[in-house]
Structure formats: C-alpha cells, structure tokens
Image: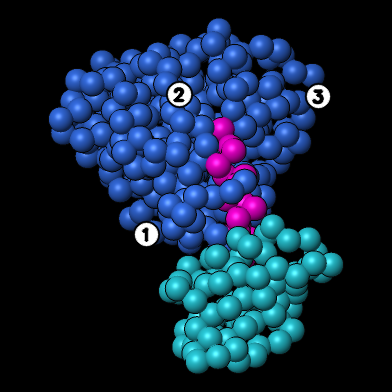
C-alpha cells in the first residue's frame, strides 16, 4: 500500500513502532471491526479504532442518544440528544478520520441477524450493557469462529477478556446469563463514567493487537479492575469441557435470544 | 541486491525515521538504502533508530555542507 503524505503524518506514531510499522498500519487500514453497541464501551473503542485508521468500522445499536448517556459515552455530544446513536457515532468518526468507512445497523443484534452481521468483520467488540446480548455475542462468535473482545463495567469495576478459537470463551467462565434483574444494570446501579473509557480503550487495544499480531492477547485470562483501589488483576480461566457452546457436547448449535432484564424493577 | 536512495534533508524528526521506515518496508531483505539527511537530530536519530529496529547501518559518510549519507541494509 502506498500511503499518502497525509496518511504518513497521521499514522506516523504507529509507523515508528517497531512492532507495527508501515506493514502493521497497512493491516489496520484493511481491517474490519464490528462494534456491538455505541455506548460507554463502544464510544471510546470506536474513537480509538477510527483514530488508528481501521479500514471499516461497523456499528450496531438501536438506541437514540439520551442526555444521561453523555456522562460517559464520549462519542456523543449535547446536540446529538435524540439522534440515533449509530448516526451520531458515524458523524464523529467521519470527522475524526475520513479514511474510515463506517457501516451502521440502527437496530439491536439478535439471534436472527447475529451470524450474518458478524460474518462481515474480522473482529467484534462487545460494548453491550446486558447479559443476554453478551451471551448472544459469545455464542455467535464461537459458532462463527470470529475473534472478539468481551467487556463489562458496573459502578467502579470493569472486566474484559479476548476470545480466539481454541481458547476459553465467556460461556466457559460464566455458563449462562443470570436470572433477569438479579444483577443491576448501569442505569440502576450507576457507573463512574471514566471507567467506560478505561475498559473500552483496553478493548480497542486488544482489537489493534489482534489486527497487527503484536503481543499477547487477553486469552484464557479475565482482566478485572476496581477503580477505587485502582488494582488490576489477571484471573486465569480455562476452557470448560461442559461449556454449552464450545464444550465436548455442545447444546447451543445456533445463536439464541435470552430474556432481557427490565429496568423497572429494583428502584431503590 | 539493489541499492535505493532516499532524500530526507527537508524532513524533521520524527518524520525523518518515519520516511526511512516506509522506504525500507518496500525493499527486499539484503537491499541497500542510501539515506541523505542533515546534521543534528536526523544524523543522530536515524542511524540509532535503524539499528534499534533491527536494520544494519553499514556506513555514515559526509557528502557536502551539512548533508550526510547513511547506508542501511535491510
């Protein structure tokens, strides 16, 4: 690939890196990454991936921007309230880096569309806020053999792991979604806005590591942190022979939808 | 084994080494690159960074005035 003078300037800090260089930047320019959710995690992840020059960024999200999102979803600005999140995100990415092609899906990921949509991308970033879709993303990615980054945040805590074929999946570790309303959502429990940036940025770095082949991904380990103590832990995780999707006798042979938690309950 | 030339006398750090790396990426292993650069930061940094990143600096020579030539092998 021949970089233009502007591209050489724009990506100079990547090109300088020994492990990235012009070759790695070319891989980034040809990569396709799907962001599931343009919220707390998807916002910083999408901005860094766009800044990095990822060739194609897909964004799937059925929500519109709400004033209460702006405390952490930094791709959306005050005048965007009421606008579709995918449109708001697309506009910012285009402004940040016109090299990036943005593909938008203004609806929710579900069992019927998951395989088709993720099939178009090289890597998937889970930036969702609920367990049913997290399990759906895991199952669809495992079934399709599609590498992805799991991420979750609540209050002051975050967790993330990366899946590649042959490694422990999210379901290996957590088995099944918790019963609806057992675990509070961010809208119930609150979340420190800045930890969305911490975690979403780790996910973006994992996507870029996967694309360029640099370093060791967060496979077979779950990274957790608590911003109150600012302690980070790497918890080793193993493939589970009884895993419903990647175990020895899988029972999940196609993506499934699970009951969504409702936010009306637990108003304390 | 071919020899190529690159003039970065008008570039400033870090674009000097950025341009050098891009040119080197287009070469085959064993090819030579003659990089023309100016005294000061470029003359200090380009040979140093090239060595650090695994290229072989074969020779640094004065051309004329403040211009020097760095011979790098991929």
Chain coloured cyan: B
Label 1: few (<14), some (14–19) or many (≥20) C-alpha neighbours in 10 Å = few
Mark 1 chain: A
Kindly report the distance in space between the C-alpha atoms of the residues bearing marks 3 and 1.
Answer: 39 Å
> Picture quarter containing residue A227?
bottom left
Q: Could you say which disc has been placed on residue A103 in the image? A: 2
User: Alpha-carbon distance for marks 1 and 2?
Assistant: 39 Å
Q: Percent position (x, y) of residue A96?
A: 34, 42
Q: How many marks?
A: 3
The chain painted blue is: A
Q: Quadrant of the C terminus of chain B?
A: bottom right
Region of the chain picked out in magenta, as a range? A18-32
Q: Viewer-proximal residue, A159 or A120?
A: A120
* Rendered image quadrant of residue A86: top left
User: If you read the primary sequence from the N terminus, does the residue marked by circle 1 or circle 2 appear first?
Assistant: 2
Q: Residues at badges 3 and 1 in contact (C-beta under 8 Å)?
A: no
Residue at which label 1 appears: A229
- Whole-percent x, y for residue A26 in the image: 60, 47
Labels 1, 2: one chain: yes
- Label placed on residue A116: none
């Amino acid at each position: 690939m021949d970089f233009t003078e502007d591209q050489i300037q724009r990506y100079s800090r990547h090109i300088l890196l020994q492990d990235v260089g012009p070759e790695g930047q070319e891989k980034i320019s040809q990569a396709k990454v799907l962001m599931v959710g343009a919220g707390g995690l998807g916002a910083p992840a999408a901005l860094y991936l766009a800044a990095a020059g990822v060739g194609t960024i897909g964004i799937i999200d059925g929500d519109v921007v709400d004033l209460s999102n702006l405390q952490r979803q930094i791709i959306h600005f005050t005048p965007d309230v009421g606008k579709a999140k995918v449109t708001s995100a697309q506009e910012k990415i285009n402004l940040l880096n016109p090299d990036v092609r943005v593909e938008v899906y203004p609806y929710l990921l579900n069992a019927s569309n998951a395989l088709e949509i993720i099939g178009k991308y090289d890597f998937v970033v889970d930036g969702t806020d609920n367990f049913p879709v997290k399990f759906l993303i895991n199952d669809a990615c495992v079934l399709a053999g599609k590498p992805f980054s799991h991420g979750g945040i609540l209050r002051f805590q975050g967790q993330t792991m990366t899946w590649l074929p042959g490694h422990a999946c999210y379901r290996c570790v957590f088995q099944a979604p918790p019963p609806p309303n057992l675990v509070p959502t961010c809208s119930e429990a609150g979340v420190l806005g800045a930890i969305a940036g911490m975690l979403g940025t780790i996910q973006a770095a994992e996507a870029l590591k996967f694309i360029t082949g640099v370093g060791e991904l967060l496979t077979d380990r779950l990274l957790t942190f608590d911003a109150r103590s600012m302690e980070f832990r790497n918890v080793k995780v193993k493939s589970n022979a009884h895993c419903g999707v990647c175990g020895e006798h899988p029972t999940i042979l196609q993506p499934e939808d699970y009951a969504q938690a409702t936010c009306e309950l637990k108003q304390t | 084994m071919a020899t190529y030339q690159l003039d970065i006398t008008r570039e400033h750090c870090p674009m000097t080494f950025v341009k050098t790396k891009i040119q080197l990426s287009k070469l085959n292993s064993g090819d030579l690159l003659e990089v023309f650069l100016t005294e000061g930061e470029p003359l200090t940094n380009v040979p140093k960074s090239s060595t650090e990143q695994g290229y072989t600096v074969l020779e640094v020579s004065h051309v004329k005035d403040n211009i020097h030539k760095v011979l790098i092998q991929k």
